[in-house]
Amino acid sequence: MTAPLTDVPNNTPTTRRVDLCGFDAFELGLLPVIRHLLTTFANPDSQAWVRAQTIAVERWGETVGLATCHRLQALLRSLRDCRNDLCVIDPLNIDQRGRVTADEETCLWMLHYMRRDNTPNARDAVERLTNGYMDPHLVREGLKFAARFPAAGVQAAPRVEKPRLTLVQGAA
């Protein structure tokens, strides 16, 4: 059983303008995807994950969009295991699309710092988001996301490929 998300009514003091937060374009693009995925967790019958994937594919193309959605789904599932009382704006509320709740902002800051390999600030964001609990599953999923989608100018970790057999032909 899932707990419902707390929907934020218009003009509450618990939201602020998202454009004033300092996130890059990629991180701002994550917000509607996050909202739809969290809506799916709270209300599986909503099928909001379909809209999350559609938004991601429209924004970043099929390869990057679906991978982004997949990594976010795993991260948010870990977050929901820690906290099921997240305050999230309804993704279909047009009047609130330019606003962000404290929980949404903290989640984006966590990703922002992880994507830039800023460990102290990322750790603080995880603790704020989980009310003081440093959940290893959430951290692992956040780091997987950051490794796959590092911020511009950040050196991505080299990918380790699986060993492959190759046929070597010698001179006879």
Image (cartoon, rainbow, N blue to C red):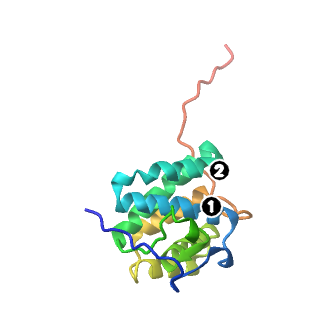
If you read the primary sequence from the N terminus, does the residue marked by circle 2 or circle 1 appear first? 1
Tell me: residue 66, above or below residue 79.
Answer: above
Tell me: residue 9, above or below residue 97.
Answer: below
SS for callout 1: helix
Marker disc for residue 29: 1
User: Label 1 neighbourhood size at 10 Å, few (<14), some (14-19), many (20+)?
Assistant: some
- Residue at position x 65%, y 20% in the image: 170
Considering depth in this image, is 79 or 58 the residue closer to the camera? Answer: 58
Marker disc for residue 68: none
User: Label 2 neighbourhood size at 10 Å, few (<14), some (14-19), many (20+)?
Assistant: some
Q: Quadrant of the C terminus?
A: top right
Could you tell me residue 166's position as x and y percent? 58, 28
Q: What residue type is labelled 1?
A: Gly
Relative placement, left or right, of 6 versus 113 is left
| Residue matched to label 2 | 60
Considering depth in this image, is 160 or 65 the residue closer to the camera? Answer: 65
SS for callout 2: helix
Considering depth in this image, is 74 or 120 the residue closer to the camera? Answer: 74
Relative placement, left or right, of 97 versus 86 is right
